[in-house]
Amino acid sequence: MAARTRPVLVYDGDCAICTRCVAFAERYVKADADIVAWQFADLAALGTTAERAEYEVLWVRKDGRVEGGSDAVGAVLLSSARPYWWPLGSLLRAAPLRPLMQRLYQLVAVNRHRLPGGTAACAMPAHLRPGAGGAS
């Protein structure tokens, strides 16, 4: 797999919450990345699967490594053209806090259809919810 010139942010384009978060990131964070809904991405070329993309936001680094959840959000913030986002990005990825940040990310992801602006399309597929025998 050839190295990319820019990282890629992969999100759930069917989810209103995810779409709003990405719009916020495009407008205010100004991440140095290509942004694509997983439904329109060549996931195999990005080194991931639809099941993982349904479960969490993904950051595909220029070297092809894939990070998900709060690590992906932190990477978006660290790639910002606006340095005031960098401390938050670092905090999300700090080793002592990573387990807590990932749990918080999962809590939001599993309940995103219940958040303001969320719709039934935002609901994570049942087989991917923690404790359902899918991704964890």
Image (cartoon, rainbow, N blue to C red):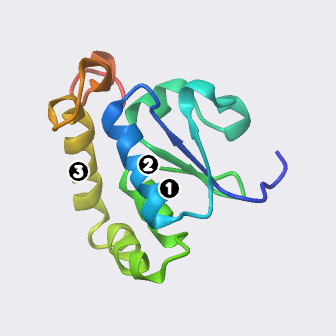
Neighbourhood count class around disc 2 (C-alpha, 10 Å): few under 14, some 14–19, many 20 upward: few
Q: Which residue is mark 3?
A: 103
Q: CA distance from mark 2 to mark 3?
A: 24 Å
Q: Secondary structure at mark 2?
A: helix
State whether residue 25 is above or below residue 38: below
Tell which circle, 1 or 3, labels the residue nearer the N-terminal end: 1
Q: Which residue is mark 1?
A: 26
Answer left or right for 131 relative to 87: left
Name the residue: 33% across, 74% down.
91
Answer left or right for 5 relative to 59: right
Tell which circle, 2 or 3, labels the residue nearer the N-terminal end: 2
State whether residue 1 is above or below residue 99: above
Q: Residue furthest right?
A: 2
Name the residue: 56% across, 24% down.
39
- Residue 120 in the image: x percent, y percent? 25, 18
Q: Secondary structure at mark 3?
A: helix
Q: CA distance from mark 1 to mark 3?
A: 25 Å
- Amino acid type, label 1: Glu
Return the residue nearer the eye: 106 or 37. Answer: 37
- Amino acid type, label 2: Ala
Q: Which residue is mark 2?
A: 23
